[in-house]
Amino acid sequence: MPSDSMPALPVSPDSAAAPSHVAANQDIESTLRENRVFPPPEEFSALAHVKSLEEYEALYAKSIADPEAFWAEAASDLHWFAKWSKVLDWNLPLAKWFVDGKLNLSYNCVDRHALGALADKTALIWEGELTLVDESGVGHSHIRKLTYAELHVEVQKFASALKALGIQKGDRVAVYMGMTPELAIALLACARIGAIHSVIFGGFAAQAIADRVNDSQCVAIITQDSSYRRGGEIPLKTTVDGALLLTPSVKHVVVYQRSGTPVYMQAGRDHWWHELTAAADPVCPAEPMDSEDPLYILYTSGTTGKPKGLVHTTGGYSVQTYLTTKYVFDLQNPNHPNDVYWCTADIGWVTGHSYVVYGPLQCGATVLMYEGAPNFPDFSRFWKIIDSHQVTIFYTAPTAIRAFIKWGDEHVEKHSLASLRLLGTVGEPINPEAWMWYRDKIGHNRCPIVDTWWQTETGAILIAPIPGAVPTKPGSATRPFFGIEPEVVTREGEKVPAGSGGLLVVKKPWPSMARTVYGDPERYQKTYWSDVEGCYFTGDGARQDADGYFWLMGRVDDVLNVSGHRLGTMEVESALVAHPKVAEAAVVGRPDDLKGQAIVAFVSLESSVTAALATASGDSVANLAALKDELKRWVAKEIGSLARPEEIRFTDALPKTRSGKIMRRLLRELATHGSIQGDTTTLEDFAVIAKLREAEEG
Ligand code: ATP
Ligand code: MG
């Protein structure tokens, strides 16, 4: 999708002549047929916001007939200092939503509840990764809770502290922290005074921080001494110190003390969070912001290339994160006053922005935040958390689900999980068999699953089932959210017939759409608005079935071209994952003189299978070779001999972004050249690439 990421794939003979990186013949063939359908459980629907498919369809039709009226009605649920004069001002690709309206997202997340009926409701439940040991040697979970009233106090104090440092409306502030309540407070405090936050995921190195800080000339960095992950301490402040050598725009650094480990503090520049807030004015009214005032900058995951700093503004983003959270997660539902909502995403990613902080807090929900890793101190940490806090709504990523499957069911089965009523996924297409596992092992066949499709650029969910209303199909993000018109088209913008693959586009503007790429409006226009005329191009391939359901097929940049047939990665990978021994798979195309491309599959096996193969009597090399043949035959049988991988490579782990997405472009380079030249700054674990290369040479 982004033109700077890599040269176009040799997708078709005429693609070299095509003016853009999207090939002229853009249909993608679909081979996978998934026929299972799961209607929403009756008990769920009876108490849900939207109770039937008919109700969803009527609401959707109304929202499409008059989207401006629809979004205006949603906006009226929120607090506005001044009402908008016009809902939408659209001048492709430039949108303004709720023109002239004045509001503050921090006010809508916090004050509205703290000053109303929800003052004493728990807003945040936080669990630290480490166990606290008391004087008598007994271990306790490290838990902190804040009510909406308490959150109101903390946000105001920190907002005052930022102001006292001279930080003003419009200033850019970088946030580089672990998952702590203070991270949410930092965002809400920035939003309160109109400072534009730019959260940088706490796993990035000094250079990646410096690049992002310099791109938007941040005046301050909010960080913490260190954070905990998988039992280890991550020295955040020390990493920031490295970045600060390269970031002349930064005048102030605020350090939240999490671990107490001594860190370097430069006089005049570095300030302790607790000292600033102790001295701060406890009252800091929310600044009335214009609807189109920037709220934050956030860089994409970098799956396809160099990350883009997307800019989100205040009004439309507030309205759509609020409404999607309410309907897709069935929150703010008077029938479920005790919901405990847990989205496992890190706030370093858009999911953390929209569905850990801004969406659920606007809905007045109780939000759980967990500091650490799912496999610390053992593989059942998540399930213990669900039981101990009685989590009702659980939202995670396919990459995490595949890890749970790989680790083995025994870690899950020990736990009740009876409090859960709704499950969600986001981040990648979910393979149908992983979806089935999630439904069975975590949801006990009782909880609807909302597979939510969206992007950093879209700000909020665009395609997902409304859980009490829309029947689900494993592997499909199902139907569009209210007011959204996605379509699957050819490069010429023509709608492809039901069942055929093509480019996923969105035909009309939506409130939470990113307004630009920071400092690079041309890149915004070129990346998203020039491939398919008049439409927003998502970069993803998809097909729509006869029921109008959307099936995401993988990224268009990753499409395979075998003997003139264009195949999405998702379907071949799903066939592999459907094999009982396979936990995870990634497929890429390698140039092939005969076929155009040959499929190379990188496969990671379930832990129990790997262990069994290693100890099995006989020649383990022969065992592996036999399994490779078995998997090739399996794919051919499941979806056709066309998709049969030419080569299978077993690997312990796949290269992923720090947000957990498979980086197929690196695998493609490895399969093609045996080395990697592309941008690897967002790679999560460099050792994975080294191991893959070793395996290849060995
Ligand atoms: P970059 O744009 O830098 O390559 P990225 O696309 O990985 O990074 P994000 O905005 O975090 O950055 O991810 C959005 C992408 O994730 C979507 O375009 C899509 O490919 C994938 N995705 C997200 N949710 C789903 C889903 N439910 N089903 C299928 N794919 C999904
Ligand atoms: Mg993207």
Image: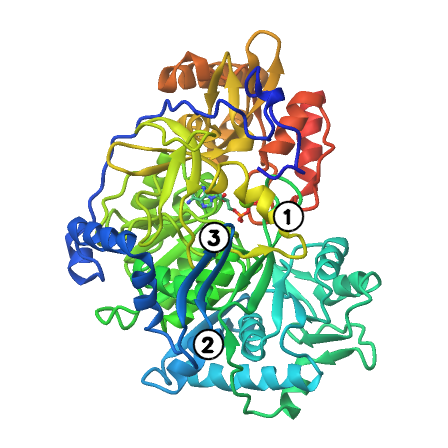
Q: Check disc 1: other Cα within 10 Å, few if <14, some if 14-19, many if 20+.
A: few
Q: In this figure, which residue is indicated by the disc labeled 1? A: 522
Distance between the alpha carbons at the discs numbered 1 and 2? 29 Å
Q: Where is residue 40 in the image (x, y as percent from the top left)?
A: 21, 49
Q: Quick one: SS at disc 2?
A: strand
- Scheme by which the image is coloured: rainbow
Identity, as a three-letter code, of the amino acid under mark 2: Leu
Image: 72 above or below 543: below
Q: Is residue 2 visible?
A: yes
Distance between the alpha carbons at the discs numbered 1 and 3? 18 Å
Whichever of labels 1 and 3 marks the residue nearer the N terminus, that label is 3
Mark 2 or 3: in front is 2
Q: In this figure, which residue is indicated by the disc labeled 2? A: 103
Q: In this figure, which residue is indicated by the disc labeled 3? A: 458
Quadrant in the rendering for residue 318: bottom left
Identity, as a three-letter code, of the amino acid under mark 3: Thr
| Residue that appears at 30% across and 68% down | 73
Q: Is residue 616 visible?
A: no
Of 475 and 695, the residue lying toward us = 475
Q: Where is residue 29 in the image (x, y as percent from the top left)?
A: 41, 22
